[in-house]
Image (cartoon, grey):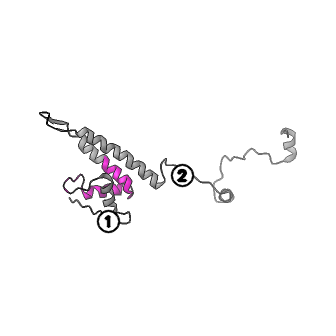
Amino acid sequence: MSWSYNPSNLGTDTSAERLNVVRYLVGDTDVDDQQVQDEEITFALSEVGNNAYFAASYVADTIAAKYARRVTTKLDGALSAEYSDLADQYRKLSVFLKQQGQKYSGGSLGISYGGIKITDVNTTRDDSNRVPASFRMDRFRFLDEDYQSDYIEE
């Protein structure tokens, strides 16, 4: 297992840059207090399509799980370790990083917006090799104007 961090190599173009960005986002930049290994970050990146923010959220959840396993320790009132607080902070960081990832990737709700071109609809309808639709918006529109005038008030 290995651990590396290079603050002068931050970016999203190469795997080394993305690894450094994930470390930077979760605050795992102190060689004397290593939280996760390079291989774990590489795995997280592969799971989320190399999105550094989503990978950082994934890693923060992993670190939170690590601290959630530890019990709060108090020795004679002089020394204490509140691991539950640390786990909560990493969970909050994970949520924040996920929101940032959604914000920067444009997929905050998983909904895309836009329109369908009329020419695309007409091209699809005119395709003779396409199975005809069983329902269309204008399916019951009257085509005969004389017939319409008998039943539709104007």
Quarter where residue 150 is shown: top right
Q: Nearer the viewer, mark 2 or mark 1?
A: 1
Q: Quadrant of residue 122?
A: bottom right
User: What label sits on residue 90 in the rendered view?
Assistant: none
- Tell which of 6 and 122 is nearer to you: 6
Q: Residues within 10 Å of mark 2 (few under 14, many from 20)?
A: few
Residue at image x 29%, y 47%? 62
As for residue 34 lying within the magenta part, the answer is yes
Identify the residue position indicated by label 2 in the image. Answer: 112
Q: In this picture, which residue range is highlighted in magenta?
A: 31-60
Residue for badge 1: 9
The kind of residue on which mark 1 rests is: Asn
User: Looking at numbered disc 2 in the image, what kind of residue is underneath it?
Assistant: Ser
| Disc 1 secondary structure class | loop
Q: Is residue 125 left or right of residue 86?
A: right
Q: Position of residue 83 (x, y in %)?
A: 23, 40
